[in-house]
Image (cartoon, grey):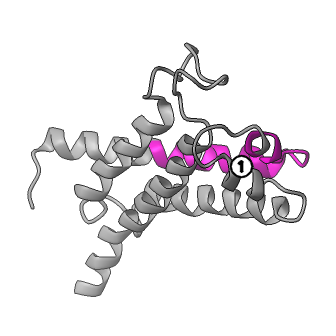
Amino acid sequence: MTYSKNQLYFLVILRMAIGWHFLYEAFLKLLNTSWTSQGYLLNAEGPLAFLFKWLGSESLIGLTDVFTISLLLVSGLALTFGFREKAGAYAGMLMLAMFYLAHPPLPWLSGAGPAEGNYFIVNKNLIELFALGVIAAFPTSHYFGLNHLLSKKQAS
């Protein structure tokens, strides 16, 4: 598959920007020793609230927090550095889907409402999820990223 220079440029920038966002979120959570997703999960609304409340329970919250940080870190590294970017994009999509479903911006839910990044049905998590779908469908690491460097090294 060949891309124009503009297509390639913007796809690489999109991939790296989302990767950086995930890395930043992972490092914030790692550096803040009091961070936990428990409040977010226990206040979940929507059709899968029972699942998120269970994940936020005292018995699972430690594992849930480690999994969240790990997924942010691994996905962020894959996307930022262009190594296994499809796997990183799919992992990020799974995580963002969970974030979206925990607090969907549906008008009949108390947590939904007009706020920055949280609009009627569509919010920033859903938009970033779809952007990762574009990254998975139009991979760029074989042009710019560690996958490109490794394939050049193996070819020689």
Query: From this viewpoint, is residue 103 visible?
Result: yes
Q: Magenta segment, which residues?
A: 18-41
User: Looking at the rendering, in which quadrant would you find the C terminus?
Assistant: bottom left
Instruction: Identify which residue, 28 or 47, lies in the foreground.
Output: 47
Q: Seen in the image, is 1 located left or right of residue 77?
A: left
Residue 68, image quadrant = bottom right
Residue 71, image quadrant = bottom right
**Residue drawn at point x = 44 percent, y = 38 percent:** 126
**Residue 134, percent across and down?**
28, 48
Mark 1 surroundings within 10 Å by alpha-carbon count, few (fewer than 14), some (14 through 19), many (20 or more): few
Task: Kindly identify which residue carries mark 1.
Answer: 27
Q: Secondary structure at mark 1?
A: helix
The answer to whether residue 45 is above or below residue 61 is above
**Residue 11, percent across and down?**
27, 45
Q: Seen in the image, is 56 located left or right of residue 19?
A: right
Identify the amino acid type marked 1: Phe
Q: Is residue 20 magenta?
A: yes
Instruction: Identify which residue, 125 or 30, lies in the foreground.
Output: 125
**Residue 84, percent across and down?**
40, 69
Instruction: Identify which residue, 112 or 15, lies in the foreground.
Output: 112
Query: From this viewpoint, is residue 156 visible?
Result: no
- Please count the marks in the image: 1
The answer to whether residue 87 is above or below residue 112 is below
Q: Seen in the image, is 23 located left or right of residue 121?
A: right
Q: Main secondary structure of the magenta part?
A: helix
**Residue 72, percent across and down?**
60, 55
